[in-house]
């Protein structure tokens, strides 16, 4: 997760300090990866 945000300092700071943002961001990444996994399985 930290690797994805390394170049985005503002997002990293918010992720580090804001628990609600962190939870939503993790859910967003999970949903994104899950949907990509599903799309690959349909090929």
Image (cartoon, rainbow, N blue to C red):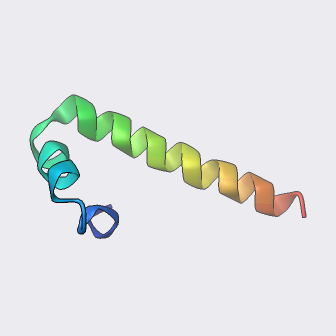
**Residue 27 versus residue 12: which sits nearer the camera?**
12
Instruction: Find residue 37 and report its horizontal and vertical position in percent.
Output: 70, 58
Q: Is residue 24 left or right of residue 42?
A: left
Above or below for 19 versus 29 = above
- View extreme (top): residue: 20
**Residue 11 versus residue 39: which sits nearer the camera?**
11
Image-quadrant location for residue 27: top left
**Residue 7 versus residue 18: which sits nearer the camera?**
7
The residue at the point 26 percent across, 40 percent down is 22
**Residue 7 versus residue 29: which sits nearer the camera?**
7
- View extreme (right): residue: 43
Q: Is residue 27 left or right of residue 6?
A: right
Above or below for 23 versus 36 = above
The C terminus sits in image quarter: bottom right
The residue at the point 15 percent across, 43 percent down is 14
Q: Is residue 27 left or right of residue 15?
A: right
The residue at the point 18 percent across, 54 percent down is 12
Above or below for 24 versus 38 = above
How many numbered circles are shown? 0
The residue at the point 25 percent across, 34 percent down is 21
Instruction: Find residue 35 and report its horizontal and vertical position in percent.
Output: 67, 48
Instruction: Find residue 17 and report its horizontal and vertical position in percent.
Output: 9, 41
Q: In this view, does 43 lie to the left or right of 13?
A: right
The N terminus sits in image quarter: bottom left
């Amino acid at each position: 997760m930290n690797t994805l945000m390394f170049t985005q300092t503002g997002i990293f700071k918010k992720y580090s300090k804001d628990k609600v943002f962190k939870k939503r961001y993790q859910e967003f990444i999970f949903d994104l990866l899950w949907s990509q996994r599903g799309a690959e399985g349909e090929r």
